[in-house]
């Protein structure tokens, strides 16, 4: 086909790539007529095709090239694209109903009809892929609308009618990948690309059964060399397609065996027997032989009978188990004497209703070259050309990163469709983020995403594009994969939790302390680089030493430490709103002396497991909100109280403070926590388990002892 957009008068190049020969036709449509500018035929030098299947792609491609060059010389035009048809070998069909609901009545346009049929083909293809029970890959090579419906009522042509719902019953045909690819590759070898592909029975019916006859229940049989392709019409539509893998070559092979000749000689003898009474030939020994035509037909009779029996059975099967009203026969194989009569007998219809169709169905065809005989051999080649106008191609070929791809053409193809067909990695199209960083903060999972990489660089025919850029037949697509970004990273100090602070009161002054973090049990600074699966705990306390270090205060042995007005250690914990103070021991000597005089009690030891346990409990109770007056750092020194409590049945006076909590009792009794005398300390208040931070009242009963 010449380059340029499709328009009236544009040359169409059709190729009928048959088992025995390649027929090329160049022509154009003007009005209701099709003008054949030139037509050339060349037989294969060898049996490069068998039963409609290409066996030697390069030899078939070379034959196509020769036909192409002859047509270019005849027309004076360079041919770059061709329309082709596939034989029905291993044909599969799918019947489907599809509809479009517009929500309200609207006028149906040609675009609506095209969209509906495209959707039908797409749905049929999806259905076939799901139901396909073989390992072979199939492609849709043709479709036909059986019936249209508007608002559920049948109609011949919905264009121009108003309808809310447009629907169609459709039949789609599928062939194996190797059949379709073989045809495309052979055409490519000849220096052509495929403009349109159809099925041979669809092509033949364009010529053999005009629409005015399709109301009748008619069968079309295209008897080629390797296959006999069948289509059925009824009620104005094509309702079924089929085939049998037996045709003219079976007759030729029988003659070759009987007469001991090569295939080419047998083929010529088969043609001669329909117009000669005696056939003269040379056998493989070089001896000249003569055989009556009637004897040759008798030799071929069993094969003819087998072939028509199979065709008749297939017609009945496709037609719902019954015969048709008439049969049109096209193709060279159906011209052999006796074929049509035997087929009529097998179908149980009058012999006059089975006929070879040739010139009588070519009234709208005009040959611009002289001496062309209009016979049944030309029906399919001409139909292939006309299919270009009736039905757009279902597949296109594009180049993706140097790879040739075949795509189903739904008129909405984009770069992403080609990438998927080429099995290009999905993450190669989109920017890839670097590796994420996973860790926990206070027991809760946290994920930091990696940095995005660079997007894929896409070009279509050298122009900048993206994954949504539409693509068309012959486009060259280049995709440079996207890159991966940097892996996620984060310092501890970036965590939002680090913005929080701990406020404490140090020597009556409120101080804001930044939080510390423990990573996998070890303290880390804000500059620590978080690692995969780190367990991070934001600490809600400081130790006295950490408070002093933060304030650049030097603590030495001459100082007493207090947390919430009681003696503490350097590693004592300081929580939110705790009070901390440190004073020289000399300044607190009187207080210590007073404490030692009190019933001979001594200050609690700062060491030992029990002491640590109590301090931990005190801290937890403080954080949970117990003993609020104390947590607020209240120091009402001018309102000191004295209360009396019973400890293990003995009275104890508690003096010198504005208020008392349970843990204060250890300052007034002799209970050495540094020397355990049991497994745990039992603490009770008024007959129930005590809390270390709960307030004490005058007259409270306290029990403290070691548990065995």
Image: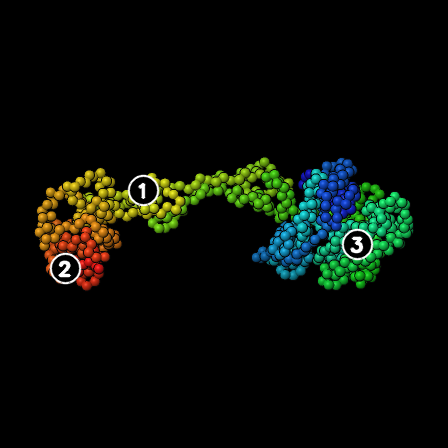
> Would you identify the image quadrant in which residue 687 lies?
bottom left
The crowding category of the residue bearing disc 2, from other C-alpha atoms within 10 Å (few below 14, some 14 to 19, many at least 20), is: some
* Residue at image location 63% in from the left, 56% down from the top: 133
Nearest to viewer (mark 2 / mark 1): 2
Label 3: which residue? 329
Foreground: 76 or 423?
Answer: 423
Q: Are marks 2 and 1 in contact (CB under 8 Å)?
A: no
Label 1: which residue? 524
Left or right: residue 615 compared with residue 236:
left
The crowding category of the residue bearing disc 3, from other C-alpha atoms within 10 Å (few below 14, some 14 to 19, many at least 20), is: many
Label 2: which residue? 647
The answer to whether residue 36 is visible is: no
Mark 3, secondary structure of its residue: strand
Q: Quadrant of the image for the N terminus?
A: top right
Foreground: 212 or 454?
Answer: 454
Q: Earlier in the sequence, mark 2 or mark 1?
A: 1
How far apart in space, not on screen, are marks 2 and 1 (Cα)?
Answer: 45 Å
Where's residue 451, x and y in %?
Answer: 44, 41
**448 to 133, vertically: above or below:** above
Q: Earlier in the sequence, mark 2 or mark 3?
A: 3
Foreground: 309 or 455?
Answer: 309
* Residue at image location 71% in from the left, 52% down from the top: 89
How far apart in space, not on screen, are marks 3 and 1 (Cα)?
Answer: 91 Å
Left or right: residue 125 compared with residue 645:
right
How far apart in space, not on screen, are marks 2 and 3 (Cα)?
Answer: 121 Å
Q: Earlier in the sequence, mark 3 or mark 1?
A: 3
Nearest to viewer (mark 2 / mark 3): 2
> Would you identify the image quadrant in which residue 93 lies?
bottom right
């Amino acid at each position: 086909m010449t380059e340029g957009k499709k328009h009236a008068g544009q040359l169409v190049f059709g190729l009928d790539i048959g088992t025995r020969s390649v027929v090329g036709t160049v022509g154009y449509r003007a009005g209701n007529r099709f003008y054949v500018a030139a037509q050339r035929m060349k037989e294969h030098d060898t049996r490069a095709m068998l039963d409609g299947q290409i066996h030697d792609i390069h030899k078939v491609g070379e034959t196509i090239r020769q036909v192409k060059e002859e047509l270019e010389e005849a027309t004076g035009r360079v041919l770059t694209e061709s329309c082709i048809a596939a034989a029905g070998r291993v044909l599969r069909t799918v019947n489907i109903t599809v509809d479009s609901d517009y929500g309200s009545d609207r006028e149906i346009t040609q675009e609506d009809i095209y969209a509906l049929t495209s959707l039908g083909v797409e749905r049929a293809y999806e259905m076939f892929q799901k139901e396909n029970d073989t390992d072979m890959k199939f492609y849709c090579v043709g479709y036909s609308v059986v019936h249209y419906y508007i608002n559920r009522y049948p109609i011949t042509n919905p264009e121009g009618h108003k309808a809310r719902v447009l629907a169609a019953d459709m039949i789609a045909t599928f062939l194996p990948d190797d059949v379709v690819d073989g045809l495309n590759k052979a055409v490519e070898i000849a220096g052509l690309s495929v403009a349109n592909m159809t099925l041979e029975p669809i092509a033949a019916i364009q010529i053999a059964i005009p629409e005015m006859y399709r109301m009748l229940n008619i069968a079309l049989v295209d008897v080629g060399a390797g296959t006999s392709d069948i289509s059925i019409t009824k009620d104005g539509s094509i309702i079924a397609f089929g085939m049998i893998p037996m045709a003219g070559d079976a007759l030729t092979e029988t003659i070759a065996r009987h007469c001991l000749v090569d295939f080419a000689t047998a083929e010529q003898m088969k043609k001669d027997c329909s117009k000669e009474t005696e056939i003269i030939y040379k056998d493989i020994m070089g001896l000249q032989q003569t055989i009556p035509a009637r004897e040759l037909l008798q030799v071929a009779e069993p094969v003819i009978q087998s072939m028509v029996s199979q065709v008749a059975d297939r017609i009945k099967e496709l037609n719902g188990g019954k015969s048709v009203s008439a049969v049109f026969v096209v193709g060279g194989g159906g011209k052999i004497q006796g074929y049509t009569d035997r087929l009529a007998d097998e179908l149980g219809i009058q012999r006059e209703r089975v006929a070879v169709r040739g010139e009588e169905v070519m009234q709208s065809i005009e040959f611009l070259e002289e001496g062309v005989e209009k016979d049944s051999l030309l029906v399919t080649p001409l139909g292939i050309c006309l299919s270009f106008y009736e039905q757009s191609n279902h597949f296109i070929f594009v180049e993706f990163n140097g790879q040739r791809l075949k795509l189903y053409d739904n008129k909405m193809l984009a770069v992403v469709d080609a990438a998927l067909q080429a099995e290009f990695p999905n993450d190669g199209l989109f920017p890839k983020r670097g590796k994420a960083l996973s860790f926990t903060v206070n027991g809760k999972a946290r994920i930091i995403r990696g940095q995005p990489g660079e997007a894929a660089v896409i070009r279509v025919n050298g122009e900048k594009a993206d994954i949504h850029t539409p693509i068309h037949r012959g486009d060259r697509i280049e995709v440079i994969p996207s890159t991966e970004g940097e892996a996620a990273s984060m310092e501890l100090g970036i965590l939002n939790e680090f913005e929080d602070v701990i406020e404490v009161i140090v020597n009556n002054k409120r101080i804001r302390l930044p939080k510390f973090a423990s990573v996998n049990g070890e303290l880390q600074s804000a500059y620590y680089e978080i690692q995969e699966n780190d367990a991070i705990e934001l600490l809600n306390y400081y130790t006295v030493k950490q408070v002093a270090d933060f304030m650049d205060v030097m603590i030495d042995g001459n100082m007493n430490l207090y947390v919430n007005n009681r003696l503490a250690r350097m590693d004592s914990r300081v929580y939110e709103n705790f009070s901390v103070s440190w004073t020289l021991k000399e300044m607190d000597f009187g207080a210590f002396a007073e404490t030692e005089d009190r019933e001979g009690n001594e200050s609690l030891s700062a060491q030992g497991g029990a002491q640590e346990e109590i301090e931990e409990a005190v801290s937890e109770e403080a954080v949970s909100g117990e003993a609020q007056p104390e947590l607020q750092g209240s120091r009402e020194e001018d309102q000191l109280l004295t209360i009396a409590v019973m400890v293990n049945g003995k009275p104890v006076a508690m003096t010198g403070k504005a208020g008392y909590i349970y843990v204060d009792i250890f300052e007034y009794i002799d209970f050495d926590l540094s020397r355990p005398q049991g497994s745990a300390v039992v603490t009770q208040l008024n007959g129930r388990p005590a809390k270390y931070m709960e307030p004490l009242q005058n007259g409270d009963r306290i029990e403290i002892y070691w548990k065995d």
